[in-house]
Amino acid sequence: MNPKSYLYKMGCYSAAVCFCMAIPAQADTTPFTFDVIYDVFVSSPPTPGHLTVESTATGSGTYSPFGNATYSETGSVTFGVLPSGDLFPFLVDLTFAASFNGGADSFTGTDVHKHDAAGNFISETITITGGTGTFSGATGFATPNTVGIAPSGNPSPNYFGTLETSGSGQITAPGLMATPEPTTLAFLSTGLIALIGLLSIPRKSKTMHECLNQCCRKRSREHGDLFIPLFQAFDARYRHVCKTLRSVVNQATSNPESPSKGAWY
């Protein structure tokens, strides 16, 4: 096998390995960012004697890298009473759904807001607990920042206000695919370069047997056959090996009964 043939074989192996490593494995965890604006509705106005009310919300926004989504919430809001007599949302306990592609893909979960007795914000936690389509079996979390913004002008008598929530998180689902990392792209590029290089190598190489036969065609077939197993054991991979074999055969056939020791090295 001459150098070109060897390089061709090794190039094929290298290209195959690079392509296999470049194929993005099905990774199920994806980070995301989001920005959603929605209107909030309550079943009835809260009063000091009726602090927990049912709440719904509808809106839309963007979840990157998943795209645009419609957003909805249902649950309850429990209000607290300040010393001044004003009410504030003490505990907001909601379930939400973010739907993509006309509802074909969605993920759902809980959104919990907590405040202390003085009305100070404590925390808001989004937990992803399920989904459909691409997000089937989804789990995850997000860290949101929710603020009140200018009223949307919704005419519903149950309209309570307009909120904007944004932040980041991560979601895990079997149907998600990870974006190729720089290392993956590097392997893919290496594989392409290797294949392009292979196309330029002419596949005109001789096998070991052909090389040996060429060396021995003017010598005794009997002596040539004696050395064939030995030469094949070397599994020569470079042109200089054939040159060395030619020298060995020349010396062995010149004095077959007492070969020079140097012929074996």
Image: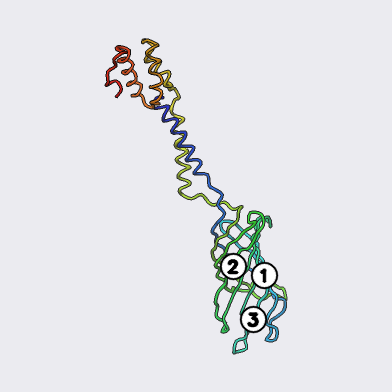
Amino acid marked by disc 3: Phe
Compare residues 80 and 157 and report the one nearer the observer: 80
Image quarter of the N terminus: top left
What x and y, as percent, mark residue 32? 55, 60
Determine which residue is flagged by label 1.
Answer: 57
| Above or below, comparing residue 106 to residue 238 in the picture | below
Q: Is residue 139 left or right of residue 43?
A: left
Q: Secondary structure at mark 2?
A: strand
Q: CA distance from mark 3 to mark 1?
A: 17 Å
| Residue 111 point in image, percent of width and height | 61, 69
Picture quadrant of residue 137: bottom right
User: In the image, which is nearer the foreground, mark 3 or mark 1?
Assistant: 3
Report the residue at 48% width, 47% height from top: 184
State which quarter of the image contains the C terminus. Answer: top left
Real-space CA distance between mark 3 and mark 2, rounded to the nearest whole angstrom: 20 Å
Circles 3 and 1 in contact, beta carbons < 8 Å: no
Q: Callout 3: 10 Å neighbours few (<14), some, many (20+)?
A: many
Amino acid type, callout 2: Ile
Image location of residue 145, percent across then percent down = 55, 70
Name which of mark 2 and mark 1 comes first in the sequence. Answer: 1
Quadrant in which residue 100 is drawn = bottom right
Q: Label 2: which residue?
A: 126
